[in-house]
Amino acid sequence: MGAPVGELRGVQLFEDLSGAELELICGPMRERLVTAGTDLITQGEPGDALIVVLDGSIKIYRRLRDGGEVILAIVGPGEILGEIPPDDGVHANGAAALEDTRVLSLDGESFRRLVEEIPSLRAGLLTLLSERLRLADSRIASLAGQDVEGRVACVLLELARQHGRSKPSGGTLITIPLTQAEVAAMTGASRVRVNQVIAKFRRHGWVTLDGRRRTSVQDPAALESRCG
């Protein structure tokens, strides 16, 4: 059984498609629940599928030879991954659920066929890839030349913009649950150093933490001043 059309209406890639076109895409899609910490894509393994996030969040990461990890992006509801098949059929990066996450998956053969059959899907894919490239360039530019405090500030602001929700009490809650080790993996800094930076930001009242690994940005102007 395919996915309900309503599940796709909030996905950027599909926003310009007609109801009939969405029906075509939903047919071969399959829904599944991925538990926190589970890989959807394994680095170094073959695979070829489009994944749509419905609820939850996924980190796209690369394991390093020294056993470390670099987090390249965080993907939340309404976003996709796997839109570019690996050249040699083997994934250069991995993807793992940060929390229990509900996704739709579409096998690569079906996705390529639909891209050929639906011009508006092809156009949407080109727009999405262009936006991804722009965001990647922007992130590299914002982190280049920064010290650790600046990089942490930039990453928290980026997460607040992309995955934030205003709180009635003030501030912006980053809805993605992240450990400080994961923040370190996004900034290229050590976990110890990131812990020190976030502790400093908390003392100043720039950010707060709750008991569910979620951070709130309370003073974005202060973080902007460190992000440069």
Image (cartoon, rainbow, N blue to C red):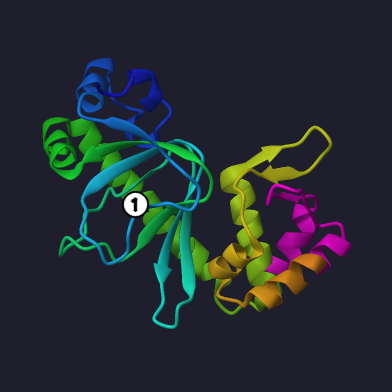
User: In the image shown, does 32 or 163 lie closer to the viewer?
Assistant: 32
In the visual, does 108 lie left or right of 213? left
Residue 203 percent location from the top left of the image: 88, 63
Residue 169 percent location from the top left of the image: 84, 36
Asked if residue 142 shows in the view, the reply is: no
Position of 8 relative to 13 (above/below): above
Classed neighbour count for the residue bearing mark 1: other residues with Cα under 10 Å, few (<14), some (14–19), many (≥20):
few
Position of 47 relative to 53 (above/below): below
Q: Quadrant of residue 153?
A: bottom right
In the visual, does 179 lie left or right of 221? left
- Residue 211 among magenta residues: yes
Question: Label 1 sits on what residue type?
Answer: Ser
- Residue 119 among magenta residues: no
Q: Disc 1 designates what residue? A: 130
Give me the residue at 80% from left, 50% from top: 218
Q: Quadrant of residue 47?
A: bottom left
Quarter placement of the N terminus: top left
Residue 156 percent location from the top left of the image: 65, 58
User: In the image shown, does 45 or 206 lie closer to the viewer?
Assistant: 45
| Secondary structure beneath label 1 | helix
User: In the image shown, does 174 or 89 lie closer to the viewer?
Assistant: 89
Give me the residue at 13% from left, 42% from top: 109
Position of 142 relative to 38 (above/below): below
Quarter placement of the C terminus: bottom right
Position of 157 relative to 195 (above/below): above
Q: How many marks?
A: 1
Range covered by the magenta-colored residues? 200-228
Q: Quadrant of residue 171?
A: top right
Residue 118 percent location from the top left of the image: 17, 30
